[in-house]
Amino acid sequence: MKDILGVIVDTADFSMESYVEGIYRAYVEGRITYTDHYVPESGQMQFSNHISWEINGIHYEGGLSFTNTRPLFDGIRLALNHFKGDHLRFLELGPGAGNACYELHCLAKTMGIDTDIHTVSYTPVNPYMPLLRSGNDLLASLSSNPNLKIIERGPHGCSWYILDEDVFRMPYEEIGQIYGKLDEPFIHHQYIGYFPRNMDLPSGGFDIIYDMFGPLHRKDVGAVVDAYSRLSEKGMLFFVFHEGYEPGQIMLEGIKERLTPIFSKRDTVVIDTQNHSAIVAKEKNALALRFRKKFKSRFQTVAANDMINFLKWLQSDP
Ligand SMILES: C[S@@+](CC[C@H](N)C(=O)[O-])C[C@H]1O[C@@H](n2cnc3c(N)ncnc32)[C@H](O)[C@@H]1O
């Protein structure tokens, strides 16, 4: 079987053990940094516990779900156009099971963008064994598994959960549709611990920092400010915020004031009022340059009803 990059995938060894072995190999190669004294919320550190869940009073540890396998946000594809022929340093805060990073890795390869991908998370992923599908596609591949738990079906999709061990009990051909195998890691370096405290992260220079329901979706404004401080001078930060928490309130207040004071006045801040996501583009970022040219706005912060449409409009000519 071939994955989306045409790499031959060996379906002979898809097991929980080989998943954990890949994490260990990455650790030995210096590709994973564990923060000292770090104890995850769920208790003792486990190598593959992407998430832990309480369902009907039962605690589940280690699995895939609709909350940790989301695809890469489409707006990042648009932003990547500006990095063609360049080097891109990408940091994902809260990668979950790693789907967005793998998508980015594949996209950057097809677009000829030399990229190194870094992550910050509570738990590591095997960078040699990517999930080939995300979100609804992954759910479709898992649908024959009797241990798949559908928690709720709603108008915008369904919430589901499956233990890692139940995925790895599937027939090899079926697992080969779900996981791939790589010779080169798709994540360059993983930092494991509680962001932003006690993290041995590189001080700066990230061109894109991406957070989809990760550490920036919490109460800690310091986490947003810390992430922002690590951008390169042409960098951009994308994150989904929570309207009930302080960072979210600061962003929504920023729309009214047309200024979000935690960021420099010279930056461009675009806030999606429907989906509660934000892009903070530094002064020299290509999107910010385009924005100022096209919009001729004197304001730092603007509202967009829909971020994707906004980015498409921004990139359209003239
Ligand atoms: C709900 S999952 C989202 C995963 C993925 N972005 C997605 O949308 O499918 C939350 C992710 O953020 C990480 N995370 C949340 N808070 C964190 C913190 N304070 N420090 C480090 N990682 C954190 C978790 O380990 C996990 O990878």
Image (cartoon, helix red, strand yellow):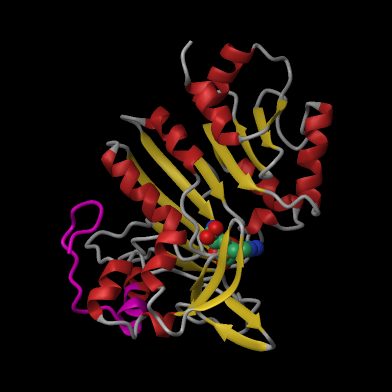
Q: Quadrant of the N terminus?
A: bottom left
- Magenta-span inclusion, residue 298: no
The residue lying toward the viewer, choosing from 203 and 87, is 87
Prevailing SS of the magenta stretch:
loop
For residue 200, above or below residue 209:
below
The residue lying toward the viewer, choosing from 317 and 211, is 317
Give the residue displayed 61% in from the left and 16% down from the top.
Answer: 292
Quadrant in which residue 82 is drawn = top left
Judge from the rendering whether residue 122 lies leftward or rightward of residue 9; answer left or right: right
Judge from the rendering whether residue 92 lies leftward or rightward of residue 181; answer left or right: right
| Residue 231 % position (x, y) | 56, 39
- Magenta-span inclusion, residue 2: yes
Give the residue displayed 53% in from the left and 75% down from the top.
Answer: 161
| Residue 58 % position (x, y) | 64, 89
Locate ligand 1 by image quadrant.
Answer: bottom right
Judge from the rendering whether residue 167 lies leftward or rightward of residue 192; answer left or right: left
Judge from the rendering whether residue 172 lies leftward or rightward of residue 30; answer left or right: left
For residue 276, above or below residue 299:
below
* Magenta stretch, residue numbers: 1-22
Give the residue displayed 35% in from the left and 31% down from the top.
Answer: 86
